[in-house]
Image (spheres, coloured by chain):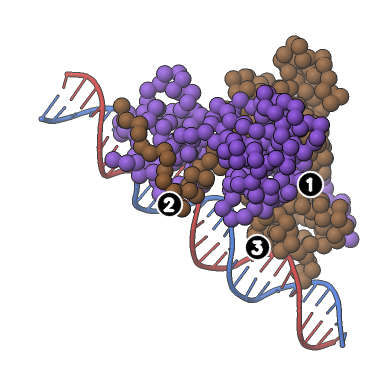
Chain colours: A brown, B purple, C red, D blue
Amino acid sequence: MAPPSGRTIPDATVARLPIYQRVLGELQDRGAATVSSEDLAELSGVNAAKVRKDLSFLGSYGIRGVGYEVDYLLFQIRNALGLTQQWPVVIVGVGNLGRALADYAGFTSRGFPVAALVDDDPAKVGTEHVGIVIRALSELRDVVRDLDVAIGVIAIPASGAQRVADLLVEAGVSSILNFAPTVLSVPDGVNLRQVDLAVELQILSFHRRHRNRERGAVDPAAESNPRR
Amino acid sequence: MAPPSGRTIPDATVARLPIYQRVLGELQDRGAATVSSEDLAELSGVNAAKVRKDLSFLGSYGIRGVGYEVDYLLFQIRNALGLTQQWPVVIVGVGNLGRALADYAGFTSRGFPVAALVDDDPAKVGTEHVGIVIRALSELRDVVRDLDVAIGVIAIPASGAQRVADLLVEAGVSSILNFAPTVLSVPDGVNLRQVDLAVELQILSFHRRHRNRERGAVDPAAESNPRR
DNA sequence: GAGACAATGTGCACGTGTTCACAAGGTGAC
DNA sequence: GTCACCTTGTGAACACGTGCACATTGTCTC
């Protein structure tokens, strides 16, 4: 019987599936044959009921009284995430962040090989990084076509990000991961995700402040800015 | 009158405040005196009603019929986020990612100066990166105390992440930003945020697959894995 | 083959987040 | 001073996400 392939999987669940996948991979390496929702929850840092509900969106792949078969569940999650094939990635911007991303083993090991590096600095074009020749931004279209690139990663300063996004879309890339701290607009049908490293720190800062306040600490940032 | 300093600000709002802050900063640089919720929404990539509701949690800082004063609103957001002071950061792990983060201008410019770099590789300890001497992991406690470090950033492989997290907590750091792809456990009172770069790509992969499916494309990853 | 046991799958209630629509309130022209 | 106009702030309805509690259904022992 074909799997139900859960018609619609909630966004919140989709965001957790990669975590389960990673944990299941570790369990598989350790030789575990099955895992209960409780153990999987513990290892993933979530609630057991949530794990069961999440997995139920993929189909009924558990065995009551036993748990989930690690191999089978892993396959189903990979399938749901579309990770049964590799998705070559192009990284635009070979600065510090671009290089770090290119070197990051986690991309390749999870099915996202870095197929190409692109930069608009003539001094960098033609040089190699981790065995990949850096191409010019003007060659983007050819790079995407020839290497069958599916995903573009933007790792340049904010000022040039929209232009690069436009070029990526024009070149045929339909998924973009943007590290530049700016809001991008892309046409319908193009999938965009945003990672802003400083935002994370700012959220931490908020919680730190709030925690202190709860404990009755004196607020060092008192109102002192006149209005007008 | 003292600002109400919104008793409780929803998490979803907190996550958007840094975006508003960034956009308002750009408006300020451009010399804008006021901004309407509609314009701010457009620039931030969100809905205007959401902007107004978000800002209302901070207090009533808008002027009906006019909009929000850029300077004043910016101050209030910074205040709410606890960004009226600097929060020195220590980066643990001076590999590619650690270096990229250390070089990232966005950290310092938004109030999170990189005060220290730490690594456990003896070959790196004592060398400099962007003018900061790399210290040994064993010196972490001193580094945190002497430089008044508030936030620890973990930029090492998953295998050592929990140990480093423990060391950071022990050293007195109460906020941790973890880039290692693993679930960390920290005591109550310690704030932890997780950024997994590969997870973002996997979410993109899901949406790509789902989009194709909607359009009636044939699923290349058909059921072919026998159960057992 | 029957019964004890174990863990899934899910109905339900609750909390959080989003969006609409509009009253309230401020501005500026005349 | 009055009036037309503009934009905020928010009540209310709806959508989404979470977690409990338990019936269901499978396994394993004897």
Residue toward you, A81 or B142: B142
Identity, as a three-letter code, of the amino acid under mark 2: Gly
At 41% from the left edge and 46% from the top edge, which residue is drawn? A218
Mark 1–mark 3 CB contact (< 8 Å): no
* Whole-number angstrom distance, CA of label 2 to CA of label 3: 36 Å
Q: In this figure, which residue is indicated by the disc labeled 1?
A: B159
The percent coordinates of residue A18 (x first, y second) are 73, 47
Residue A216 shows which numbered tag? 2
Q: Are marks 1 and 2 on the same chain?
A: no
Q: Quadrant of residue A39?
A: bottom right
Residue A146 in view, yes or no: no
Quadrant where the N terminus of chain B lies?
A: top left
Q: Secondary structure at mark 3?
A: helix
The numbered mark at residue A49 is 3
Decide: few, some or many residues near mark 2? Use Cα within 10 Å; few <14, some 14-19, many ≥20.
few
Name the chain letter of the residue that bears numbered label 1: B
